[in-house]
Image (spheres, rainbow, N blue to C red):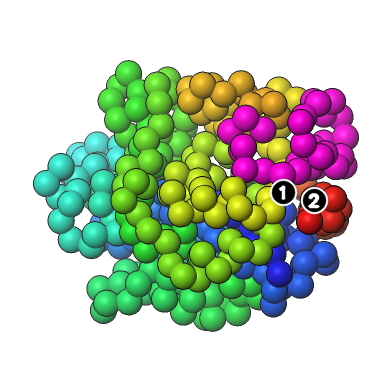
Amino acid sequence: MVTFLSGGTGTPKLLAGADEVFEPSGTTVVANTGDDVELGGFLVCPDLDTVLFLGGDELDRETWWGIDGDSAETHEHLQEIAETAGFDSGPRYLDSEAQTAGRRIARWRRFSAVAEFMYIGDRDRAVHLTRSSLLDEGHTLTEVTETLADAFDVPWRVLPMSDDPVATLIHTPEGMMHFQEFWVARDGEPTIESVEFRGAADASVTDAVVDALTDPVVIGPSNPITSIGPLAAIEEIHTALAETTVVAVSPFVEDQVFSGPAAELMAAEGYEPSTAGVAEAYPFVDAFVLDSADGTELDRPVVRTDTEMETDDDAARVARAVDQALAEVL
């Protein structure tokens, strides 16, 4: 039995080859929901959906986002209407009063669908509409996720980190913005002053997540701040990680990051943007998997391999290194 903490693309890339090492029926994936947004009334859960689409062999693995080969007629027509009507193409954040109205789980992250700033495919949209409607019928996000996982025939158990709202907000000189606005609409260009996980202090976790975190935990090479940070910001999860066995794959090779805004985010939060900084950000990790070219000396056991994952065979190689690291500390 093993539990993966997933956010962004790092852990999903590891999961793509992990079935050769970890039995899918004994694998649970707990996914970040801090990136979720409500867009035009439906809830988008990017990190949950990446895992669902990957497990169902539907994921667009060029972008690691959305459904492979999906059309986007609705999205394109929304763009056309906005352009014809003269609307600004930027993200349209609903006002502060609207942010706490409606579905509680969507708090602090509600956007208009006018000039839809996130690319949403048609089949992808059907998933979001189904999720949102089931939530409106009274189901929890955990229950809805299990329903969608069954629909996609996902081999692992997939759980959201919480059924409560947690929003990853980026504070910049231009003002506060949700992570999706910062990363998708602004291409990660605004200067980062700090990161807030709004709602994390009050969020609770389900019994299913508590149980999953009693198994050994694997953290793939995901962004430590915005992909894994929202999970660790929830007290029950942080406590559980301190009490169980955890192995993490560094998203850096010394001070070079594989992809994404991890370096800037870590620096903004006071960590050195490097493998050493990741170790500082992860005090609950018992052992690390580092790239063979990464000479960083850590105060915990280290297993080295080529950690670049371009293929499923690459991912299986890294998964074997993770298994070796687990064996050293279990």
21 left or right of 55?
right
**In the image, residue 300 lies in the stretch drawn in magenta:** yes
Locate the C terminus and report the quarter of the image it occupies.
Answer: bottom right
The span picked out in magenta is: 279-308
Locate the N terminus and report the quarter of the image it occupies.
Answer: bottom right
Q: Position of residue 126 (x, y in %)?
A: 40, 71
Residue labelled with disc 2: 329
Q: In this view, which residue lies farthest toward the front? A: 243
77 left or right of 100?
right
Residue at 67 percent across and 43 percent down: it is 285
Q: Which mark is residue 247?
A: 1
Q: Are marks 2 and 1 in contact (CB under 8 Å)?
A: yes
Pick whichever, 19 or 314, lies toward us.
19
What secondary structure predominates along the stretch shown in magenta?
loop
49 left or right of 96?
right
Residue at 50 percent across and 71 percent down: it is 208
Type of amino acid at the residue the image marks with label 2: Val
Q: Position of residue 290 (x, y in %)?
A: 80, 37
**In the image, residue 245 lies in the stretch drawn in magenta:** no
29 lies above or below 285: below
